[in-house]
Each structure stands twice: as structure tokens, then as C-alpha cells.
Amino acid sequence: RKEVEQDPGPFNVPEGATVAFNCTYSNSASQSFFWYRQDCRKEPKLLMSVYSSGNEDGRFTAQLNRASQYISLLIRDSKLSDSATYLCVVKYEGDYKLSFGAGTTVTVRA
Amino acid sequence: GAGVSQTPSNKVTEKGKYVELRCDPISGHTALYWYRQSLGQGPEFLIYFQGTGAADDSGLPNDRFFAVRPEGSVSTLKIQRTERGDSAVYLCASSLKGGPSNTGELFFGEGSRLTVL
């Protein structure tokens, strides 16, 4: 079983719609969580960290459920520019590296 | 530029050949990571340097892969006797701090796309 699992999508949504997707992680020792964004044939970039209490950054909301070992990302009022692959990332306590999921592809259409 | 720089951006080689991929991290970043990304997959960890030393090389798939960072800045990933299965995008990332102090923000280069024929 992969450490980090994501629904690959694609999620095809119209502009202005809300889209949400989850990521599950297998290791309960996971300490820190992040969402990265990767545009087609480009490098991943940090979108936002995920805090235990949940957090928002503009139109993006991230939630963490430690009991069920999943995190979620919700995008409100989708823009064409939100089209990308969203990578779920976990960091284990005492570890140095980040572990990435395979990504969820979102396509926003006009 | 101020970002992570990787060269070459594209490399096509024949099975069995030796390749070197170079990474120039952001100035002042002590932590450097190599990841590999295959089509449709997320980045897969290869090796992590803190300064000049490889603090964690547990992700290197076999002994054909080796990486160095002799002066604590530029790093080179070396692949011997390349195989078709080595074809992927090799991503380098750096961060200001490594280890448990890592805030989780890695700055990635655009990658070196390796194709082994």
C-alpha cells in the first residue's frame, strides 16, 4: 500500500464551481501535511500547509482528520488558472524528507 | 536567477551509458534533495543532503545511482549503466533548513528529463 494515496481524477469543473478532493495516508506517525501544486511539465510548488484546526488561504481550504488519516482540499469559485495537479504531501516525525502522493488533476473549463 | 537551477533540462541517452545531472540550489540553502518523477506519479524521494553529507540515501533504487555535493552547494546525480526504466524527470529541491526543522517548503528546480533509449 502506498504511503500517500489520492484520487487521480481528473476533476473537470466549470469556472466558478467548488471542487474538493481527499488524500489518505497510511502512517499514523505522519506529523506535517501540505498541498503542493504542479502545472503541466513544471515543477511542484507549495500551495499551503495543512494545520490540525483546518486553514484557509483565499479560495483554498485545507482540512486534516487525524483519526481517519486523511486530508482534504477544497477550492471555491474555481478559476481557469486553478487547472493543475494537486499533490498531497506528508512529513513523518523525525524524518527529513517529504512523501508525495501521485496527485489529483483538476481541470477548470470556461 | 534566484531559483534552483538544473542542467541539462533534457537528456537522451542510450541504454548502458553513464549520465550526470547537475543541480545548483538556492544560495544559502543547506538542505538539498533529489526526487524522481515518472509519468502520472508524484515525486519519489532519492537522496537528501545536509551540507556536504548525504544524510539519507534510502531512496536510491540501486548502486547504479550515486550523488555528491562536495562543497555543500552544487550537487551532481550520477547514473551508471542506464536502463530504460530510469527514464523520468529528475527533480532537485532545496530548503533553507533540513531535518526536523524543515518547514515543508521545498523549492524545486524545473527538472532534468532523462530518456533512455
Image (tube, rainbow, N blue to C red):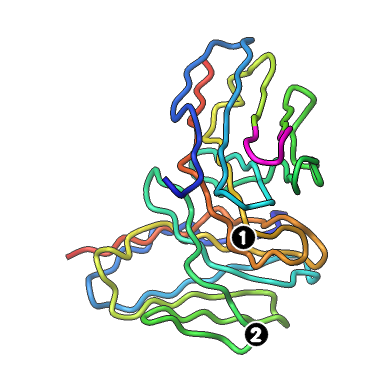
Image x and y of residue A69, in percent: 69, 75
Q: Is residue B67 left or right of residue B107?
A: right
Q: Amino acid at mark 2?
A: Ser
Chain containing mark 1: A
Report which quarter residue A89 is drawn in: bottom right
Q: Any mark on residue A52, and which?
A: 2
Residue at the spot x=74%, y=72% of the render? A31
Crowding near pointer 2: few (<14 within 10 Å), some, many (20+)?
few
Circle 2 SS class? loop
Q: Is residue B34 left or right of residue A43?
A: right
Report which quarter residue B83 is drawn in: top right
Q: Amino acid at mark 1?
A: Glu
How far apart are the alpha carbons under marks 1 and 2?
A: 19 Å
Chain containing mark 2: A
Residue at the spot x=58%, y=48% of the render? B93
Report which quarter residue A54 is drawn in: bottom right
Mainly helix, strand or loop, the magenta region? loop
Judged by depth in the image, the label closer to the viewer, 1 or 2, is 2
Specify which label sits upstream in the sequence, 1 or 2: 1
Q: Any mark on residue A37, and which?
A: none
On screen, residue A62 above or below A82 = below
On screen, residue B87 above or below A91 = above
Residue at mark 1: A5
Depth order, front residue of A102/A94: A94
Question: Which residues, given as a range, are shown in magenta?
Answer: B69-75
Residue that sits furthest to the left in the current view: A110
Residue at the spot x=72%, y=42% of the render? B47
Q: Is residue A50 left or right of residue A90?
A: left
Residue at the spot x=45%, y=42% of the render? B110
Crowding near pointer 1: few (<14 within 10 Å), some, many (20+)?
many
Magenta segment includes B70 = yes
In what quadrant of the picture does the N terminus of chain B appear?
A: top left
